[in-house]
Image (cartoon, rainbow, N blue to C red):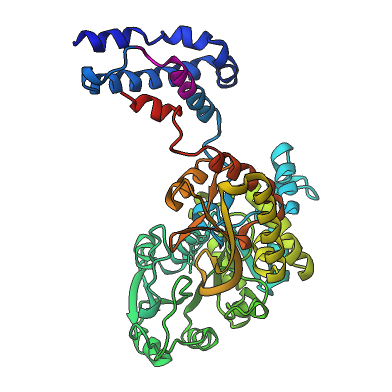
Amino acid sequence: MDPRHARLLRQIPSVDELLRHPALAEAVAALSRPRATEVVRRVLTARRQEILRQPPETLPPRLELAALEQELAQALAAAARPSLQRVINATGVIIHTNLGRSCLAEAALEQILRAGRHYSNLEYDLEAGRRGSRQAHLEGVLCQLTRAEAALVVNNNAAAVFLCLSALAKDREVIISRGQLVEIGGSFRMPDVMAMSGARLVEVGTTNKTYLADYERAITSQTAMLLKVHPSNFRIRGFTREVPLAELSALGRRYGLWVMEDLGSGCLVELGRFGLEPEPTVQEAVAAGADLVTVSGDKLLGGPQAGIILGRREAVQELRTHPLLRALRPDKLTLAGLEATLHLYFDETRAFREIPTLFMIARPLPELWAQARRLRRALRRRLGERLAVRLVETSARVGGGSLPEEALPSVALALTSPHQSPEELEARLRRAAPPVVARLERDQLLLDMRTLRPEDLPLLLQALEQTVAAPAAAPGTPEEARERP
Ligand SMILES: *Cc1c(COP(=O)(O)O)cnc(C)c1O
């Protein structure tokens, strides 16, 4: 080894010395000693390797201890933070699957806390004093809201589709329109799920047009089900034809086949009034006579992740006794949150006020402008010349595979910094505390008001202050210090 390498390596303090260092004491205590030791070892190993990678003539004569301590403090703080963190969604995509889809209503959170903190009657019938069913808690409210005869809740909508196909169509044929063999994202492909369930896929029609006669011609003695899948995340436009669910249900009844619709988003209220293309509601699908309708709990419904199966008594009964149900069942926290969310729908005004997903969709544009102006004023006060802020009209999206093309009018703060590129600003905001996920568009950074709730604003300001207040090119930051010859 070159003596210049060796000299610098010798100056690195020992793990024990660093763990006892007063500047790091708080961070070490917060993490517990064994985990802190691991973090310090990792940082030191990386630092040693970095020194060894550098040509000896470029090495500084002395190790910059202050920079190392700062790096350690950051690494210890990062290790103490939970991996799953609160994030500020400034993307304008309301049901953002990567950011956790729907935020829950306060009423739902309270129920979740109660169910988590205490024992509950999850599977206990308090009247009879014996074992009960976890499914009993939601069936009543689901049937009341949707007018379905029976209901069942599972882990998510993918699980719902899988359970329905496994229980009702294993080793038999399921007829589906070619235009509906969709991929939902996160590699949920209809054909793959069907194959896993043991059902055999029979495609009918063409990509753009399918008629009732196409389904009817494909029916054989092997057919178990007619399946419709809502093309959640795309639209086929122009010369198109799909068979309405009511017609498919009538055909199914005539031939004694199950009819199912995977509706995806699970909207319980009309959204047409917000200028959005009408998304089929769950109530409409149930009324159209399908034996089974499946929806997600955390898309337009605005609840926790869940798969909701609604339908006729006989069809749901087949699922209840299927062994897979045990593997796909929802946990008590989900049930608690979902029950409370569903109860809000009995008063639609309350649903729009209290369910964040609906609140964001319904929020009037003038309110968003007012929020944008307030935020701009606060930014000017706090950051002055460090940041240029303009208000621009934007299009927010519902997202989550619902209403894919539908734009919700919105407003954004367009940020430009004289010292940082938009990409740099975006990257630093993502690493702020709390992290802010924004949108880069045409060389500017946009913070969309539609996905920012009033309670997010103080934290957003805090994150911006950290981000913009520490210019990336300033000397003395640990990265810079290390790179200086
Ligand atoms: C979103 C979606 C799914 C998957 O639902 P998860 O709740 O994410 O499992 C399945 N089918 C359709 C039509 C969807 O839109």
Q: How many marks?
A: 0
Residue in view at x 39 percent, y 71 percent: 182
- Quarter of the view holding residue 13: top left
Residue shown at 44% from the left, 74% from the top:
234
Is 64 one of the magenta-colored residues?
A: yes
Q: Is residue 471 left or right of residue 3?
A: right
Q: Nearer the viewer, residue 40 or 263?
A: 40
Main secondary structure of the magenta stretch: helix
Relative height, residue 439 to residue 7 (above, below): below
> Quarter of the image containing the C terminus?
top left
Give the answer, above or below, for where 475 lies relative to 269. Answer: above
Q: Is residue 366 visible?
A: yes
Task: Kindly give the residue lying farthest to the left in the view shown.
Answer: 1
Vertical position of residue 145 compared to residue 378: above or below: below
Position of residue 211 in the picture relative to residue 34 (left or right): left
Could you tell me residue 325's position as x and y percent? 52, 54
On the image, the x and y values in percent for residue 4 come to 24, 11
Seen at 51% across and 24% down, the residue is 76
Front position in the image: 80 or 224? 80
Range of the magenta residues?
62-72
Residue situated in front as seen by the camera: 347 or 444: 444
Could one spot residue 177 in this view of the protein? Answer: no
Location of residue 139 in the rendering, given as x and y in whole percent from the top left corner: 68, 62
Q: Is residue 129 magenta?
A: no
Q: Position of residue 73 (x, y in %)?
A: 51, 22
Q: Residue at x 69, y 75 (%)?
A: 147
The image quadrant where one finds the N terminus is top left
